[in-house]
Image (cartoon, rainbow, N blue to C red):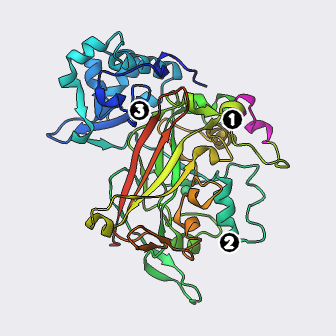
Amino acid sequence: MSALNPTHDPKRRSWVETANAREAAFPVQNLPYGVFRRKSGPEAARAGTAIGDQILDLAGARRAGLIDGRAADACSEPTLNRLMALAPADWTRLRQQISDCLATDGERADDCRRRAAELLVPIADATLELPAEIGDFTDFFTSIYHATNTGTMMRPDSPLMPNFKYVPTAYHSRASSVVVSGAPVRRPNGQAIDPGAAAPRFGPSRLLDYECELGFFIGAGNRLGEPIPVARATEHIFGFCLLNDWSARDIQGWEGQPLGPFLGKSFSTTISPWVVTTEALAPFRGPAFVRAAGDPAPLAHLASADDAARGGLDIVMEVWLQTARMRQEGAAAVRLSQSNANDCYWTVAQMVAHHTSNGCNLRPGDLCGSGTVSGKDKGSYGCMLEMTWRGTQPVTLPNGEQRNFLEDGDELALRAHCARAGAVSIGFGECRGLVEPAR
Ligand code: CA
């Protein structure tokens, strides 16, 4: 598990002044990776690091000799897959070099600063692309509060399935329809059955929802047939993003038995463009979710003392909504909920260990989702299904509008940050999508 090193030093500042603002998402301690190109003119997509309101062009930094090694070589590619496929030691080396370029006291700072005009691109002038070519996308179901709430709606007598405390449950979702923040999301058409109806209808979903999730990208994969032990799983996680698993609850409800989610989920999943590395999150690790007295201990293949002590991630996650009317009225987005990645019953290391425990191979750039991150209280419910209790308790917005589920023109944004005494706060940026009417 990555340890603290000089790149985390809270005293480090950047010569890119916007990175030093108190509320900056991308200070020099963060250094997330993304794939970008300038909006103006045709040019190749390549890797960059967010610093304040700027992007450091890593392909340019490599050409200028400011960074080197095989991780730096991978930064000229139009996806991060090759970088992700390397070892944690390569990632650490590149991060140290980038920190040395961008920190005021960094060894490479003078050279980098001299070339700032060619190497820095304002985030506002860039198009951010999907960070990786995603081969597979697996979505877990790890918040016990989300599982209990949604279970209560279906099975009031036994909300939690008997496997929940033993198995980090998941389903295989669709990689092809993962889109990057800012891409519109079209309301899907599908089959659903209205209460009391004898037969289903086909048409636009009437119960469109979001799910606030933590996403993570697999780094080096495993060979088919060779499980990743839980104690080594963190080495296989390159980094994290925000993930909105858009869900059409009416389609999902009708199609879901017996094989689980399909078209109610596969029409779109939005992720944030910046990948916050496992290493950047080191200061925000802590104990994993504390199981209630009487809960079973994880089976041996999912148990690790180090993971129990440091596998928890203190990431504050927020959901923001701006309706079409709010936009017209010039009203800012309103926060619907706030939860924490630590509300997940299973750690990401346990998810990876479980995923590969049957020998299934993960590959660099594979995407996993935590499942809806809901906390204990209503203000921390990570989807509208829970917040409005399946549409029976609508949410009233500051302008008087009400929502049972999402309407056309609604823009949903996920945001997240980490804050802890003795560390510089880091952010994830945004995971945003505007709902367009059905075709
Ligand atoms: Ca989900």
Front residue of this view, candidates 436 and 429:
429
Residue beneath the point at 57% across and 63% down: 261
Is 283 left or right of 258, judged from the image as shown? left
Task: From the image, tell me which residue sits under label 3.
Answer: 32
Is residue 310 at least partly visible in the picture?
A: yes
Q: Residues within 10 Å of mark 3 (few under 14, many from 20)?
A: many
Mark toward the start of the polypeptide (1 vs 2)? 2
Task: Give ligand 1's quarter of the image.
Answer: bottom right
Is 308 left or right of 320, judged from the image as shown? right
Query: Gap in Å between the C-alphas at discs 3 and 1?
Result: 24 Å
Mark toward the start of the polypeptide (3 vs 1)? 3
Marks 2 and 1: in contact by CB < 8 Å? no
Amino acid type, callout 1: Pro
Residue beneath the point at 33% across and 52% down: 182
Please identify, in this view, whether the residue under mark 1 or under mark 2 is nearer the observer. Answer: 1
Which secondary structure class fits the magenta region best?
A: helix
Task: From the image, tell me which residue sits under label 1.
Answer: 287
What stretch of residues is rendered in magenta?
A: 298-308
- In the rendered image, the quadrant that contains the C terminus is bottom left
Ligand 1 within 8 Å of disc 1? The answer is no
Task: From the image, tell me which residue sits under label 2.
Answer: 154
Q: Position of residue 319 (x, y in %)?
A: 47, 55
| The disc label shown at residue 199, or none | none
Mark toward the start of the polypeptide (2 vs 3)? 3
